[in-house]
Image: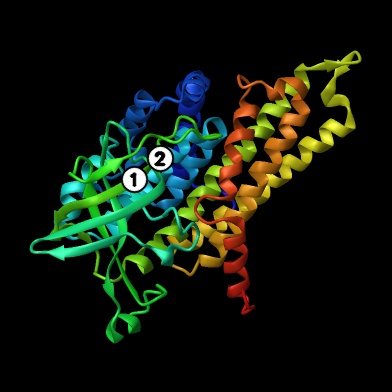
Amino acid sequence: MTELTTEYEDLRKTVRDFAEQVVAPVAAEHDRDHTFPYDVIRQMGDMGLFGLPFPEEYGGMGGDYFALALALEELGRIDQSVAVTLEAGVGLGAMPIYKFGTEEQKQALLPDLAAGRALAGFGLTEPGCGSDASGTATTAKEDGDSWVINGAKQFITNSGTDITRFVTVTAVTGTRDGRASRRGDGAGGGKEISTIIVPNGTPGFTVEPAYNKVGWNASDTHPLSFSDARVPRENLLGERGRGYANFLSILDEGRVAIAALATGAAQGCVDECVKYAKERRSFGKPIAEYQSVSFAIARMEARAFAARTAYYEAAHKMVAGKPFKKEASIAKMISSEAAMDNARMATQIHGGYGFMNEYPVARHYRDSKILEVGEGTTEVQLMLIARSLGLPA
């Protein structure tokens, strides 16, 4: 898939205009002050961006995941914090409800999420687990008509904003029996892992103070703790014991989304360098006329092109209902490395100015490293690609 249809192209242009005219003027301020861009998010909700892949019956726009990816690329060009707020809000907050929720849960929760009036987080990562999601230690025990949750989560996006409605958490709900094992949920250690919706404000559920991060400063990220947090039994999301397997499928889709965001970041660095190289003069002429500079920017463009091609292929297969796990991992790895490599080179081309936070390339330099870590580290992607080739990983 190399050319966009008219509908996709119109969406891309609309989001690009919004990113340049609305997001760009306030991005540096929110980054500097570590503040969440509520007004920008509200306008994105009004545009329907949070509802792009959801049916109209749930308040969505009736589009697909590729439409979301295009929007993420354009936002990622300008401000990764805004882009990841959308990515996590849709892919981690709303998508599990849409894919695994009951009809009652969808009707109750999706309209506000799709409209951007509310956000939700997904609590998977724990202090002692990292990439080993099967090592989940958080527990949820049945007590009458309730689940009682104890444990902790970390690095949870969109978990502590003023409009965060709930967090869906993975928790050990028992021990797998033979039937559960045959379901193939993939969790190690005989654990039965399920997903449970925990509304913000639930007694015993604490959103801890926000992290002081290297980048993504306008994105909301918190550790969470649960101490006898009690929620109704009907807050179980999906089939009991399928939480781990369900989240793995969400993660595959999320890698395509992160790849699109990272491609935008890589392209944003190219755009800034082209503009700067034409304006900046050294030894009597624009630095763009020096081959070392023009060749460096050409390599940056090649990286962005390869990243875009990779995520287009992965998204195309996903939307078509074809297997896409390997393509998602390839796209995520290529694009995140492209974003980091381009940010490093863009900073070099800008020289001392690239070290000043008011320049977008400095923000990309700080923001891009997490792209090689979140939604599965580069090493995890290599493991998955190796496995797809039948190699021991």
Disc count in the image? Answer: 2
Would residue 353 be found to the left or right of residue 204 on screen? right
Q: Which mark is residue 86?
A: 2
Which one is in front, 216 or 287?
216
Is disc 2 in contact with disc 1, using a CB cutoff of under 8 Å? no
Which residue appears farthest toward the left when viewing the image? 144
Using the rendered image of the protein, determine whether residue 31 is visible from the camera's viewpoint.
yes
143 left or right of 228 in image: left
368 versus 257 height, above or below: above
The part of the image, by quadrant, that contains residue 384 is bottom right
Which kind of residue does numbered mark 1 sit on?
A: Leu
Please, which residue is most extreme toward the right here?
283
**Colour treatment of the image:** rainbow
Which of these two is toward me, 322 or 190?
190
Which amino acid lies under the numbered mark 2 shown in the image of this protein? Leu
Which of 55 and 360 lies nearest the eye of the viewer? Answer: 360
Q: In which quarter of the image is the C terminus?
A: bottom right
State which quadrant residue 41 falls in.
Answer: top left
Residue closest to the far front? 227
Q: Is residue 386 left or right of residue 118?
A: right
* Residue 87 pos. (x, y %): 43, 44
Side of 276 where 65 appears, left or right: left
Where is 207 relative to 92, above or below? above
Q: Residue at x 53, y 37 (%)?
A: 76
Q: What element carries label 1?
A: strand
Residue underneath mark 1: 224
- Residue 353: x and y in percent read 72, 20
Which quadrant holds the N terminus? bottom right
**Is residue 1 visible to the viewer in this orientation of the structure?**
no
Callout 1 crowding tier (Cα within 10 Å): few <14, some 14–19, many ≥20: many
Sooner in the amino-acid sequence: mark 2 or mark 1: 2
Q: Residue at x 64, y 40 (%)?
A: 266
